Structures are given as C-alpha cells and as structure tokens.
Image (cartoon, grey):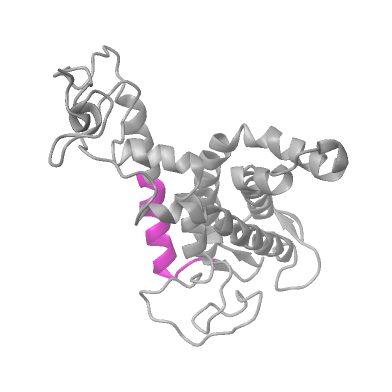
Amino acid sequence: MSAPADTAPGGPSPAGAESGVGAPGRAAIAARTLRGDRWWLQPAATFVGLMIFVVYATVRSFVRSAYWVDSYHYLSPFYSPCLSASCAPGSSHLGVHFGTVPMWIPLAFMSLPFLLCFRLTCYYYRKAYYRSFWLSPPACAVAEPHRTYGGESRLPLIVQNAHRYFFYIAVIISGINTYDAVVSFHGSTGGFGFGLGNIIIVANVILLWLYTLSCHSCRHVTGGRLKHFSKHPVRYRVWTWVSVINTRHMMFAWITLYTLILTDLYIMLVASGTISDPRFVN
C-alpha cells in the first residue's frame, strides 16, 4: 500500500516533522557534509571581510569628528549629504535644512539608511550574508543548521523585493557623491586645487558608480521587458553596456566597501592633522 500523501517522498512533511535536509524522502546522511576540503574558509573570510566594514562604518558614522577638511573641501562619504545644523561649517554642500540632531542619529541620516538597504538587498550581498552569517547554507553540499526556510515571501526577508526602489535612491546619492567630488577641487581659498585627496575621492566615486550601475536592477531597468531589441536600439545599447559590468558586480561590491574605508580614513587623517595632503595644483 502506498504511503499517505502527506508523508510520501517529495511531498509536504506532516506538522512538526523536520523539513529541508531532514525531510522525509531525503537521503539519511548523519554527517553535515561528506566534503573533505576546507569548505568553511570562504564563508569565514566573507564574514570577517563584511564585519570589518560594518564595525568601521558604524563607528565612523557616529563619531562626528575629522570628516571635513575645510581647506580643500574634502567631505567623507559617510557624512554626505550633511544637511543639519550639527554639521561642521562649510560641509553642508546642499544647504542646512534641519536643526541640530542628537548623537545617536548619524549626520548623513538622509543617505546612510537607504544605502544600507541597497547593499543589504543586493543580489550578491544576499548570497554573501546568507552563507556567512545565517549559514543558509554555508557552502555547496553542506547541510544548513536550520530546520525550516520560508524564503523571501514574508517578513523580514520580503523586504528584499524592494531592492529596485533602493537602487533608484542609490543613483541619486551617487549623484550627490559626484557633486562632492567636484566641490573638492575648489578649496576655501577659491580657485582650482588638486591633491592626492582628489584622486582618492574621484576614484571612490567612479567605483561607486560602477557598483551601482552594475546592479541587476539597473540591467532590468535598461533592457527588461523588451521583446524586440531592434525596435529600441538606444536601450539595447545601454543594456549591453550594463551587462558587461554586471558580470563584475561581485567584484565592485567588495572593492567599494574598502574604497569607502580608504576615502574616509584618508580624510580623517588629513582633517585631524595627522598627515598633510600632497598638493599638485594650489
């Protein structure tokens, strides 16, 4: 006699029974994995790499010191845009639109939450922290420790579906970062100026644009839902450009984490007087 429908191989498990790798019908392998290589190195390295950025960015976003070099108009990306009366004089490139804010609110409160959501919902970062933080699963052919998985169909993971909207905001913020880079070529003394800090800031902005535009949502915006590329030659051309950098989205995702740290660290050292900014012009 055949097994009941609710316990048949491949069918849903009865209430209270294990699911996932422990579900009825799955191979009964007691070991977590039969792999003999050091499969844990990649998720461990990813965990460490992400945690370095998270800790550094969190601390620097709240300390409110050495983020603005008035002489050269260098503004840390962790403080852009700075729109409140709590900002250092001159650092509010887009004007002062808010009063003083308490210390527990970062000065870049208009951008950091959206950039965080953009990164958290990014297709690459999902894979990275699902594997390295949630161990879901930690590696191929390695059983995850969780008994159930509801997918991205309910809170909190349903928020992942808003990635495309965070992409639109990220484009605007990248534009603001570009404006900050332009402003950095005109110091407090007036006129054009150019130093090592400008190179670092501009390089960071370019890489941020590459990360933003290589996003899968950008690829969909430029060429998604087109049935006939020949009827939309401009969108097709843009889609091909985006597709090229889309293949390197993971690389840009990692590079920009550390160019952000490098840019902020350099500005912090110059602003605090620890080092001087080598000037090539003015």
What span is in magenta?
A: 51-67
> On the picture, is 161 further left or further right than 36?
right
Seen at 40% across and 68% down, the residue is 62
- State the image coordinates of residue 28 (x, y, percent, origin top left): 16, 18
Q: Can residue 213 be seen in the rendering of this structure?
A: no
> On the picture, is 265 further left or further right than 137?
right
Q: Magenta span has 276?
A: no
Seen at 16% across and 34% down, the residue is 18
**Residue 111 position (above or below residue 144):** below
Seen at 80% across and 38% down, the residue is 228
- State the image coordinates of residue 74 (x, y, percent, origin top left): 62, 63
User: Which image quarter: residue 250?
Assistant: top right
Q: Magenta span has 66?
A: yes
Classified by dominant secondary structure, the portion drawn in magenta counts as helix
- State the image coordinates of residue 244 (x, y, percent, origin top left): 70, 33
Q: Nearer the viewer, residue 128 or 4?
A: 4
> On the picture, is 173 further left or further right than 141?
right
User: Which image quarter: residue 195?
Assistant: bottom right
- State the image coordinates of residue 248 (x, y, percent, origin top left): 61, 33
